[in-house]
């Protein structure tokens, strides 16, 4: 579904990403782990068009996307969540999901001015869709609460609902469990597996290895902007390079 | 009706001032649209100048009727907004404000020297006829008949209010609100940020051009000096006083801030001072402005409490 070849991102003298090659197969859940500052979020930004690689190629379903703006990539079927929650805080929970379906709507300003049936039908349809998503994430009681006033765990779930609202094929989750307790984390794992069962492809950036072990089919390890390992959970766990990256090198025997 | 107009006139609000209040309400609405999309643009004084000059030149020099000329001024402002918006809207916050102030000043100076530029073109191209005087430099265009009527302005404000109310509930308005709150996330949700920002900028420019056309046919004279930095800041002040938490905030701000110096006229040299103090009080204590729904809720609550208090007092008296 998503193929990265020789992707590099340079910020001045700093190589944030160097020659990254990745493959996210259709229908699978790929994990991306790495110590803080490894370049995980930069990589997601390059995939979603919020940032652009300085070199290399990213293909999404055979379409090169490395130079496309974010809204085009979303229209192709990619969605994401953010490590530091970025909801539309001044909108209600339901409005967040309605505005998230922007690309699925067609109504223009003129439709809304003269109240065409298209405007009415579309508004109802988007609200209904949004409400279904709220139910799925158990947020329906809070539909009219301002998103900024939601408790932290609910905000995380709303972000996931918002990503799903664009009707994506591929969903990138940037540290979805940050700040969650083990019960919430396990529940989130269930939600992720449910998306996979519905035919979505996912990439999960995480520090929580229990979640990675629970959901991921394969794992990439990023350190200092380079992929240092790739394999199943078992393979990664026993990989000496990975252990070194996290725990440091053992001093002379 | 006479009674109302007499009462208003007694506090300094004659018909001219009331008409001006509504012109400024229209200008305040023009900046609301860009602020709603999170763009801190002060360009609307420049678009006002364009709308004003284009419509006045059409009615004075080319014999156009009033309404087509006003609409032409509005369209002209919108057309000029297209090449301005594309590069300038890449900037944000205070940088956008500075760049748009630059546009306002360039527009003013272009109008000031327009006849000179035309004359220069004539000499370069060796055209022998006398170059026309179009903007008349710093003297401006004088002797414009007053054609702007209060009912036109009230009608325009009503139409624009309807536009704003519908805009909020439209796909377009939701996209703008999303862009204001987080531009990058809005893009990730499939919103074409560049497109929506530019459309809002152009629509704001057209409203400003319309306001400019009305103001040009109100004061008998238009001069480049009336459309500079000061005007840009005035337009911003209307929306600060009125608040941008609701669509009617800028209208209230435009009306109130135009009326205030007239009402305070008996205070002579202190009017400017009081004007400034009022603005400061609003910025410090009522950042939501006059149109803040929360402010009106609390006003209603206080009013209800007062009514209850008076009623209770009455029943207590009756009991005693």
Image: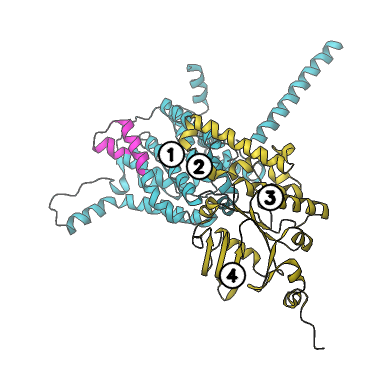
Chain colours: A yellow, B cyan
How far across and how far down the image is residue A99, in percent? 59, 43
Chain letter of mark 1 equals B
- The answer to whether any part of residue B36 appears in the image is no
Circle number at residue A197: 3
Q: Magenta segment, which residues? A: B55-76
Total marks placed:
4
- The answer to which of marks 3 and 4 sits earlier in the sequence is 4
Q: Classify B36 as above or below A38.
A: above
Q: Residues within 10 Å of mark 1 (few under 14, many from 20)?
A: many
Q: Which residue is mark 1?
A: B207
Q: Classify A172 as above or below B142.
A: below
| Closer to the eye: label 3 or 1 | 3
Q: Residues within 10 Å of mark 3 (few under 14, many from 20)?
A: few
The residue located at (72%, 28%) in the rendering is B301
Magenta stretch encompasses residue B72: yes
Q: Which residue is mark 4?
A: A21
User: Nearest the camera: A24 or B58?
Assistant: A24
Q: CA gap, disc 2 to disc 1?
A: 9 Å
How far across and how far down the image is residue B90, in percent? 48, 56
| Closer to the eye: label 3 or 4 | 3
- The answer to which of marks 2 and 1 sits earlier in the sequence is 2
Chain letter of mark 3 equals A
């Amino acid at each position: 579904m998503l193929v990265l070849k020789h992707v590099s991102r340079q910020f001045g003298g700093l190589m944030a990403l160097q020659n990254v090659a990745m493959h996210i197969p259709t229908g699978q859940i790929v994990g991306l782990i790495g110590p803080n500052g490894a370049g995980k979020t930069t990589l997601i930004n390059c995939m979603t068009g919020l940032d652009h690689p300085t070199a290399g190629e990213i293909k999404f379903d055979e379409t090169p996307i490395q130079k496309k703006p974010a809204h085009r990539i979303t229209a192709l079927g990619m969605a994401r969540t953010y490590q530091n929650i970025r909801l539309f805080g001044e909108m209600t929970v339901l409005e967040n999901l309605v505005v998230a379906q922007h690309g699925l709507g067609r109504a223009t300003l003129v439709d809304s001015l003269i109240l065409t049936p298209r405007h009415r039908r579309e508004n109802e349809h988007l609200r209904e869709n949004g409400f279904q998503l709220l139910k799925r994430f158990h947020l329906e009681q809070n539909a009219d609460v301002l998103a900024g006033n939601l408790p932290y765990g609910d905000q995380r779930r709303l972000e996931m609902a918002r990503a799903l609202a664009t009707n994506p094929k591929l969903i990138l989750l940037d540290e979805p469990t940050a700040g969650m307790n083990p019960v919430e984390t396990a529940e989130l794992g269930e939600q992720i597996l449910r998306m996979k069962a519905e035919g979505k492809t996912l990439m999960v950036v995480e520090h929580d290895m229990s979640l990675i072990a629970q959901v991921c089919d394969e794992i990439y390890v990023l350190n200092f902007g380079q992929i240092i390992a790739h394999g199943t959970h078992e393979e990664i766990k026993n990989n000496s390079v990975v252990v070194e990256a996290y725990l440091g090198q053992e001093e002379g025997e | 009706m006479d009674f109302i107009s007499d009462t208003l006139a007694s506090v300094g609000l004659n018909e001219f001032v009331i008409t001006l209040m509504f012109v400024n309400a229209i200008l305040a609405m023009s900046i609301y649209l860009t602020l709603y999309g999170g763009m801190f643009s002060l360009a609307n004084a420049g678009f006002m100048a364009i709308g004003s000059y284009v419509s006045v030149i059409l009615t004075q020099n080319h014999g156009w009727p009033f309404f087509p000329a006003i609409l032409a001024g509005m369209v002209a402002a919108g057309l000029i907004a297209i090449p301005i918006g594309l590069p300038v809207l890449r900037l944000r916050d205070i940088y956008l404000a500075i760049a748009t102030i630059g546009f306002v000043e360039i527009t003013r100076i272009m109008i000031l020297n327009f006849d000179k530029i035309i004359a220069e073109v004539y000499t370069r191209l060796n055209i022998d006829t006398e170059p026309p005087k179009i903007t008349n430099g710093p003297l401006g265009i004088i002797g414009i008949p007053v054609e702007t009527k209060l009912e036109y302005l009230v009608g325009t404000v009503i139409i624009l209010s309807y536009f704003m109310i519908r805009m909020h509930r439209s796909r377009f308005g939701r996209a703008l609100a999303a862009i204001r709150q987080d531009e990058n996330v809005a893009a990730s949700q499939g919103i074409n940020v560049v497109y929506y920002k530019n459309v809002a900028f152009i629509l704001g420019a057209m409203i400003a051009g319309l306001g400019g056309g009305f103001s040009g046919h109100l004061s008998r004279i238009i001069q480049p000096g009336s459309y500079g930095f000061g005007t840009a800041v005035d337009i911003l002040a209307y929306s600060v006083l009125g608040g941008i938490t609701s669509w009617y905030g800028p209208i209230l701000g435009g009306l109130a801030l135009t009326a205030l110096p007239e009402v305070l006229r008996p205070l002579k040299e202190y009017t400017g001072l009081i004007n400034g103090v009022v603005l400061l009080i609003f910025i410090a204590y009522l950042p939501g402005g006059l149109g803040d729904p929360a402010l009106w809720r609390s006003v209603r609550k206080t009013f209800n409490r007062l009514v209850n208090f008076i009623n209770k007092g009455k029943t207590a008296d009756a009991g005693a």
